[in-house]
Amino acid sequence: MKKIAIPVKDGIVDGHFGHCEYLNLYTVNENNEIVEQEMLFTPEGCGCKSGLVPILAEKSVNVMLVGGIGSGAVDALNKSNIAVFSGFTGSVNDVLDAFVNKNDRGTDERCSAHESGCH
């Protein structure tokens, strides 16, 4: 099973991990079917969301699909065995379908908009 997290803002994949309003969490079985979905709300404002990493790890998330994300956040997620695939845009449903059913792994783009690189 995969547990996939997708940061969301205004109903689409957020282009900046550090700005997301919430994360959609999906549990996907071996047949690529969504068997569970939940929302994880995040603190408001810009900033590194890597403080969410322990919560995501506790919820058994092992994949993060994002638009833009900085290297600091990627490192924090990777240290908790959460694989990060970046460069996704569009609706959450389309991105989830592309990853699960079409083997789309994004573009591996990283943000550098903030000095910390944690986005």
Image (cartoon, grey):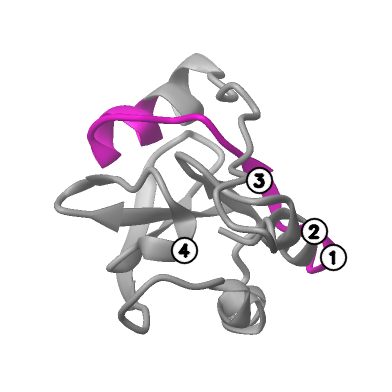
Q: 63 above or below 36?
A: above
CB-based contact (under 8 Å), mark 1 and mark 2? yes
Instruction: Give how far across and how far down residue 97 sits, in percent.
Output: 36, 28
Q: Residues within 10 Å of mark 4 (few under 14, many from 20)?
A: many
Residue at (60% x, 64% y) in the render? 61
Kind of element beneath mark 2: helix
Q: Is residue 28 magenta?
A: no
Instruction: Quadrant for residue 78, please give it.
Output: bottom right
Tag on residue 75? 2
Instruction: Give how far across and how far down residue 116 sits, in percent.
Output: 69, 63
Residue carrying label 4:
18
Q: Is residue 42 left or right of residue 60?
A: left
Kind of element beneath mark 3: strand
Q: Earlier in the sequence, mark 1 or mark 3?
A: 1
Instruction: Give how far across and how far down residue 65 sits, in percent.
Output: 51, 43
Closer to the observer: label 1 or label 2?
2
Residue at (62% x, 70% y) in the render? 60
| Separation of residues labelled 4 and 3 (CA atoms) | 14 Å
| Separation of residues labelled 1 and 2 (CA atoms) | 6 Å
Which amino acid, mark 3? Val
Residue carrying label 1:
79
Kind of element beneath mark 4: helix
Which amino acid, mark 1? Lys
Comparing 7 with 34, the one in front is 7
Q: What is the span of residues highlighted in magenta in the rendered image?
A: 78-97
View extreme (top): residue: 102
Quadrant showing the C terminus: bottom right
Comparing 37 with 70, the one in front is 70
Residue at (60% x, 24% y) in the render? 105
| Separation of residues labelled 4 and 2 (CA atoms) | 14 Å
Residue carrying label 3:
84
Q: 24 above or below 66?
A: below
